[in-house]
Structures are given as C-alpha cells and as structure tokens.
Image (cartoon, rainbow, N blue to C red):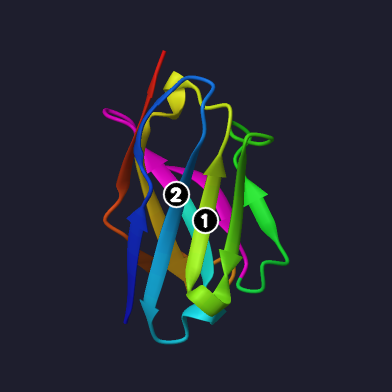
Amino acid sequence: QVQLVESGGGLVQAGGSLRLSCVASGRNTSSLGMGWFRQAPGKEREFVAAISWSAGSTAEADSVKGRFTTSRDNAKNMVALQMNSLKPEDSAIYYCAARTFPGAQYEYWGQGTQVIVSS
C-alpha cells in the first residue's frame, strides 16, 4: 500500500507562486510514476502534470505549460509542483497521485490540498 500526503496549498494573489509537495510512504515509492490533478468546484478532475519514476520524463497540461513544473526527490520520497504566474482559474483542490505502471490508471491518491488564487 502507498500513502500520499500533499501540503503547500493556500491563498495567493494572481501572478504569485506556490509550491506543492507530496510525500509518499509505503512500498517501493521511488519506482512509482507520479501525477498531479486538480478539481475545481462544479468541474471534473483534470490532469495537471506527471513525472516518471526516474524523473526522466515529465508532462504538463496545456493550461499550465510554461507556468507549472513538477520534480521529484526519490531520496526524500517527495514530489513537488512549482506553480508560477498563478491565475484565478488555477483555483482548485490539488491531488497527488501514484501509479505502478506507465500509462496505467493512477492507483493511489492523496487527500488533496486547496489552492485559491485571488484576482
């Protein structure tokens, strides 16, 4: 089993930055592919970014490309999402997720951390 705990959310003005962290615990966490998703009120959950277990491959949604960057530190069992140039439409609950196999569904989810961007 894998447990994921996010932190770093909060209230920020438009144009500002936040850094979200996700700490993983459990079996073989360094071998997991990691992702970030978000869900705004009344909307479906959407993909934000992903990073492979080796950090050799990353992907970002078009809506955040050039503003958000994901990274990981396997020695600390941690994944981070650096969010710059935040916009009000980035406001959502952000979730960290993990999967065992590339391209497979994400099996493990954190509880989420809320981000509010004021205009």
Residue found 33% across the figure and 32% down from its top: 40
Residue 51 located within the stretch drawn in magenta: yes
Instruction: Decide if residue 44 is in sight here.
Output: no
Residue 68 shown left or right of residue 106 in the figure: right
Residue found 41% across the figure and 57% down from its top: 96
User: Which quadrant does the C terminus fall into?
Assistant: top left
Q: Quadrant of residue 25?
A: bottom left
Q: Which residue is mark 2?
A: 20
Residue found 67% across the figure and 67% down from its top: 55
Q: Position of residue 52 (x, y in %)?
A: 62, 67
Label 2 secondary element: strand
Q: Position of residue 95 (x, y in %)?
A: 37, 51
Which stretch did the figure color magenta? 37-52
Label 1 secondary element: strand
- Callout 1: few (<14), some (14-19), or many (20+) C-alpha neighbours within 10 Å? many
Q: Which residue is mark 1?
A: 80
Residue 100 located within the stretch drawn in magenta: no
